[in-house]
Amino acid sequence: MSPLAAGLVQVGILFAALAVVYRPLGDYMARVFTAKSHLRVERAIYRFARINPDAEQKWSTYAYGVLGFSFVGIVFLYVIQRAQSLLPWNFDRGNVPEGMAFNTAISFVANTNWQSYVPEAVMGHAVQMAGLTVQNFVSAAVGLAVAIALVRGFVRHQTDRLGNFWVDLVRGTTRILLPIAFIGAIVLIALGVTMSLKSGVDVDGQVVANAPVASQEVIKELGTNGGGVLNANSAHPFENPNEWTNLLEIFLILVVPVALTRTFGQLVGDKKQGYVLLGVMGVIWTAMLGVIWAAEANGLRPLEGKELRFGIPGSAIFADATTGTSTGAVNSLHDSYTGLGGGATLLNMLFGEMTPGGVGTGLYSILVMAIIAMFLAGLMVGRTPEYLGKKLGRKEVTAAAVSILAMPTVLLIGAGIAAILPSTRAALNNPGEHGLSEVLYAYASASNNNGSAFAGITVTSDWFQSSLGLCMLFGRFIPIIAVLALAGSLAAQKKVPVTAGTLPTTGPLFATLLTGAIVLVAALTFVPALALGPIAEALL
Amino acid sequence: MNNFLKQSWAGLRILLALTVLLGVLYPLSVWGISRIPGLHANAEATDTTLVAVPREGDRYFAPRPSAATLPASGGSNKGELNEDYTKVVAERRTAVAQREGVPESQVPQDAVTASGSGLDPHISPEYAALQVPRVARASGLPVERVRELVSASTSGTFTTTVNVTALNRAVDSAAQNNGR
């Protein structure tokens, strides 16, 4: 097969598979978050935690739940890394150093999965399973819960109750992520992914590290996490041994964020509202795929950092999926991409991770952007904007603006300081414009909770560990608090009746407005920085 | 602050319960399932052909260059405008051309670029064909026989590749049978 045909066939299979599960999964997720009864295992968890699952929470309590749960998650993950030498299967890898443990704890709780460590040398199987895998599940479930809370803000009227965070968290885990992950892990094993409790395996006289890969691999993709079980991440043949595992992993990355648009349509009682979001996500995603693929196919060293079994299309599709969501897993090294191709993966993150974005985070981010788009439209025609039957007043637009601006703020401050620090030069793996791209990519990845890297940059200094850690923290939780406040003030409102003056939000006009808002906000914020890095490089 | 502490306490208990479920029961049951005979020939990757490491001697096919430091995996992360790395790639090209006795223009891309994992088990059919005469010479096998071994290790649905690890083991056993 020619590379072009091979790539188109792969994209076709991927789209077909997503289309098949779109309705059933989307509808199922809607039922999960509206069902009245609890599973037995869920009841056991609520009893153990002494929680009343039938009590609903105000937005502030919901937010405290998210923050409290994430806070103890960070502390727990930090402690078990620092005490690794006491845990089984540590293979004398010792305790994880302080700065690295701090960064990694935040990274996995914030659904970023930025990795400043080489797993084969640093992480034993116990931390990988009981620490990192657990956060792979629950950090995704937190994103899901926040998205559902925001949707409830639109659906409910004149109430101060948004649901119960613990119930949303547990259900997202036990009813959505765990069953899919369990089946996915078995399929991955059947297709050749390894699952070993040993530290490594002898291959023709040399030791190659091995791990319990399959169980973590599947949730790494499904939860849009991205932290590799092994250093080379999904480029490693043990994580991603062939073309079919590659397609399955790309599918797993996209499936929940894509199907959530259907869930949204179901919950707001108008499926077209979901389709229009999916359309916007799909158009931007596909356009970016075209850019990455074409740029890589015409590179000077197209195979550097890529695996031969995936080829250029298989690498480009993965790169677009991983940066268009908040995943950050890689099956090829973005650092070795062309100026244009690598720049496109960076831009994908700078769109704010909503094409289609991470599990839950993609949906709430694009809904926030929809509010911004309606606000802009309202300014143009001089009317108070409305969306889904709710007025977008000062409170709502302020919350949306805070949520949108948090990421660029921490990103540009962090990258700006890093760029002028004298110590940064020694951390770079490439000279010139590409060096700046490495810095920019690192802060974009951290602030957007993506986790992929132009991985040549050495980020083990105290400055990078702490500043990137803070970017991940603020990039995750400032938008979450703003989104929950937004949900609270939407839920408190009365429903506004649809009139002749209401701008319909299901047609091409709205889709264009929303696409324009996504592209323009990113362009206005980041063109100066991009011009000095990837754009300069692409023109050289 | 009170509410935050109260929620954190509930969160800790939820986290512990979920850690048992997701961090212990889930991975260990997946591991248990991976032991079911017939599901996976090789969950432990014993004698695996999933990865390639370079082997000493002219009788073996060379895999792609690697930037990994075993037992860890990894790539070069070098950008395409990195001039120092361009020199490295040029040196590799010269070395491969000399080793195989062909002009540099015949050396394919995969022979001079490092893969993402540093363990890429595959080379292109072109790179394999380039190495056939040398391997035949050094192993004492007829060129035709080596070509057969190459095509037996060639596969792929979307991209056609040659598995070097499987191929080198096939060369070994063919050479042994040949010697007998």
Image (cartoon, grey):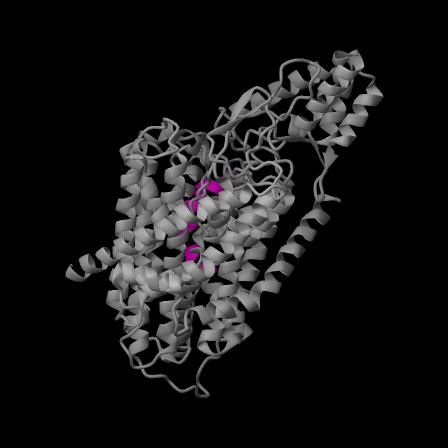
Query: Which residue lies at the image location 81% right of the left edge and 27% below the top edge?
Result: B148
Left or right relative to A451: residue A474: left
Q: Position of residue A473 (x, y in %)?
A: 30, 49
Residue A61 drawn above or below residue A464 = below
Q: Position of residue B13 (x, y in %)?
A: 27, 55
Left or right relative to B6: residue A330: right
Check if residue A479 falls in the magenta segment: no
Residue at the farthest front position: B37
Residue A6 drawn above or below residue B133 = below
Report the predominant secondary structure element of the magenta stretch: helix
Q: Nearer the viewer, residue A93 or A197?
A: A197
Determine the image quadrant of residue A172. bottom left
Looking at the rendering, in which quadrant would you find the C terminus of chain A? Answer: top right
Looking at the rendering, in which quadrant would you find the N terminus of chain A? Answer: top right
Q: Is residue A73 visible?
A: yes
Total marks in image? 0
Q: Position of residue B26 (x, y in %)?
A: 44, 49
Residue at the farthest left position: B2
Check if residue A534 falls in the magenta segment: yes
Which contiguous range is marked in magenta? Answer: A519-537
Left or right relative to A144: residue B180: right
Query: Which residue lies at the image location 60% right of the left edge and 39% below the top edge?
Result: A241
Q: Is residue A262 visible?
A: no
Residue B11 drawn above or below residue A278 = above
Query: Which residue lies at the image location 29% right of the left edge and 62% below the top edge?
Result: A47
Determine the image quadrant of residue A156. bottom left
Query: Which residue lies at the image location 83% right of the left edge and 17% below the top edge?
Result: B142
